[in-house]
Image (cartoon, grey):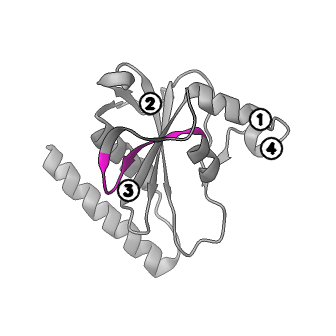
């Protein structure tokens, strides 16, 4: 299947997921695959076919070349009252970077943030007594604090858009 067909299928999947949520108030579990597709395309990553190896893609250029990338996605629904959280991130040494892509209600990407394994490990160690930290979970807000903004809906890919901490 060529890239055009995949682009078209992903477009249809976004529309279907958004309509389903509008109609039922429930979400379809498609954010993971949409995230893998969007991040690999935007950041020039090669997706892994094996979903059991502990990472989603490998970098092909620049500072990501040869790095194992874990991809996470989160839809930020306007009507949600809860604090958005990221799914579990296991600091097991199988990945080098985590990229989080944030979506609007229509499952369109808004921003992508990238954090290193060291950034994640340090953030999880901050409150070792917290149950969520023990499970490797954190809020979207915390991930944004420890990461670099690497892609935006309006500007696309820019190597150093914004970095809120120095390395």
Q: Residue at x 76, y 37 (%)?
A: 134
| Residue 141 magenta | no
Q: CA distance from mark 1 to mark 2?
A: 23 Å
Q: Of tags 1 and 3, which is closer to the observer? A: 1
Residue 13 horizontal/vertical position (percent): 32, 61
Give the mark, 1 or 2, whose residue is nearer the N terminus: 2
Name the image quarter holding residue 3.
top left
9 up-or-down from 90: above or below: below
Circle 3 — which element? strand
Q: Which segment did they paint magenta?
A: 146-156
Front-most of 66 and 3? 66
Q: What residue is disc 3 on?
A: 109
Q: What residue is disc 2 on?
A: 69
| Residue 149 magenta | yes
Q: CA distance from mark 4 to mark 3?
A: 30 Å
Tell whether 12 sits left or right of 23.
left
Name the image quarter holding residue 120.
top right
- Marks 3 and 4: in contact by CB < 8 Å? no
Q: What residue is disc 4 on?
A: 131
Give the mark, 4 or 3, whose residue is nearer the N terminus: 3
Front-most of 123 and 8? 123
Q: CA distance from mark 4 to mark 2?
A: 25 Å
84 up-or-down from 123: above or below: below
Q: CA distance from mark 2 to mark 3?
A: 18 Å
Give the mark, 4 or 1, whose residue is nearer the N terminus: 1
Residue 49 horizontal/vertical position (percent): 35, 31
Q: What residue is disc 1 on?
A: 126
Tell whether 82 sits left or right of 35.
right
Q: Residue at x 74, y 40 (%)?
A: 133
Circle 1 — which element? loop
Q: CA distance from mark 1 to mark 3?
A: 30 Å
Give the mark, 1 or 3, whose residue is nearer the N terminus: 3
């Amino acid at each position: 299947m060529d890239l055009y067909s995949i682009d078209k299928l992903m477009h249809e999947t976004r529309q279907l997921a958004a309509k389903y949520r509008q109609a039922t108030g429930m979400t379809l579990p498609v954010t993971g695959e949409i995230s893998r597709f969007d991040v690999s395309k935007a950041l020039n990553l090669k997706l892994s076919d094996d979903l059991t190896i502990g990472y989603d893609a490998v970098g092909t250029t620049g500072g990501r070349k040869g790095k194992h990338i874990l991809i996470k996605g989160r839809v930020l629904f306007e009507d949600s009252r809860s604090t958005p959280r990221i799914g579990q991130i296991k600091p097991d040494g199988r990945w080098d970077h985590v990229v989080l892509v944030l979506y609007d209600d229509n499952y369109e990407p808004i921003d992508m943030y990238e954090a290193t394994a060291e950034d994640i490990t340090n953030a999880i160690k901050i409150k070792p007594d917290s149950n969520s930290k023990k499970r490797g979970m954190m809020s979207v807000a915390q991930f944004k604090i420890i990461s670099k903004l690497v892609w935006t809906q309006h500007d696309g890919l820019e190597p150093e858009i914004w970095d809120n901490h120095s390395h």
